[in-house]
């Protein structure tokens, strides 16, 4: 995946987060937003996901991770469990298996540190392993999403570092 941070994808991601936090806590977050926008909770969630998708398309790695989260935990009315979980897997995989160590950043945006990017990659791998554990039925019978194949053939260097250990050594 081509990750990068620029003013536009950072702005879209920030709006996405604002809408999402407002969705989660309508009485405590975004009081200024409440005065100017009259959205229902579902509309706020839709706006959060739409802005996140737009940010991810422009290469923001935080948005890519968050889209995996949205597919994993929301969107059940839009997609079957299998499709939803496979899409979450695909977004998490873009980060977990990335060989990048830094994310290019344009001068008008806030850079992501090495440690922050590595944390996103590790959390993506943990999310993938959690998907395998919670939704094994979504991965059976499909070689592209087979647990053994992914752990053997697509094992990122992170599996041998820190707290993430592959059972294949």
Image (cartoon, helix red, strand yellow):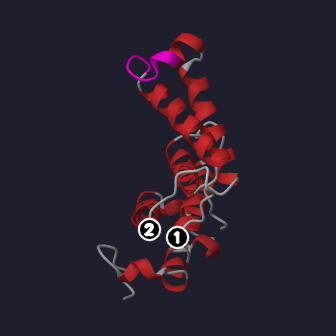
Q: In the rendered structure, which disc, 2 or 1, sits on the residue that comes first in sequence?
A: 1
Quadrant placement of the C terminus: bottom left
Question: Looking at the picture, does residue 160 appear above or below residue 40?
Answer: below
Q: Secondary structure at mark 1?
A: loop
Tags 2 and 1 touching, CB below 8 Å? yes
Q: Which residue is mark 1?
A: 102
- Seen from the viewer's position, the closer of residues 26 and 152 is 26
Q: Secondary structure at mark 2?
A: helix
Question: What are the residue bounds of the magenta stretch?
Answer: 26-32
22 with respect to 49 (left or right): left
Q: Who's the residue at 44% across and 68% down the image?
A: 114
Question: Looking at the picture, does residue 147 appear above or below residue 69?
Answer: below
- Seen from the viewer's position, the closer of residues 143 and 28 is 28
Say whether residue 158 is magenta: no
Instruction: Give the residue furthest to the bottom.
Output: 169
Question: Looking at the picture, does residue 79 appear above or below residue 42?
Answer: below
- Picture mark count: 2
- Residue 135 position, x and y percent, is 47, 58
Instruction: Give the residue furthest to the front.
Output: 107
Secondary structure mostly seen in magenta is loop
Question: Looking at the picture, does residue 139 appear above or below residue 71?
Answer: below
Residue 92 lies in quadrant? bottom right
Residue 40 lies in quadrant? top right
Report, in whole angstroms, how far the alpha carbon at label 2 lies from the one at label 1. 6 Å
Say whether residue 31 is magenta: yes
Q: Which residue is mark 2?
A: 114
Q: Who's the residue at 55% across and 39% down the image?
A: 14
């Amino acid at each position: 995946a081509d990750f990068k941070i620029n003013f536009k994808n950072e702005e879209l991601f920030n709006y996405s987060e604002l809408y999402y936090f407002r969705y989660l806590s309508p009485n405590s977050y975004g009081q200024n937003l409440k005065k100017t926008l009259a959205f229902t909770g579902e509309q706020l969630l839709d706006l959060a996901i739409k802005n996140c998708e737009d940010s991810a398309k422009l290469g923001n790695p935080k948005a890519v991770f968050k889209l995996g989260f949205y597919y994993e935990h929301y969107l059940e009315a839009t997609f079957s469990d299998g499709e939803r979980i496979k899409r979450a897997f695909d977004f998490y995989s873009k980060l977990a298996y990335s060989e990048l160590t830094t994310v290019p950043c344009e001068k008008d945006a806030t850079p992501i540190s090495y440690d922050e990017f590595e944390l996103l990659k590790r959390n993506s791998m943990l999310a993938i392993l959690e998907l395998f554990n919670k939704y094994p039925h979504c991965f059976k019978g499909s070689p592209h999403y087979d647990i053994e194949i992914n752990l053997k053939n697509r094992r990122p260097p992170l599996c041998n570092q820190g707290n993430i250990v592959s059972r294949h050594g």
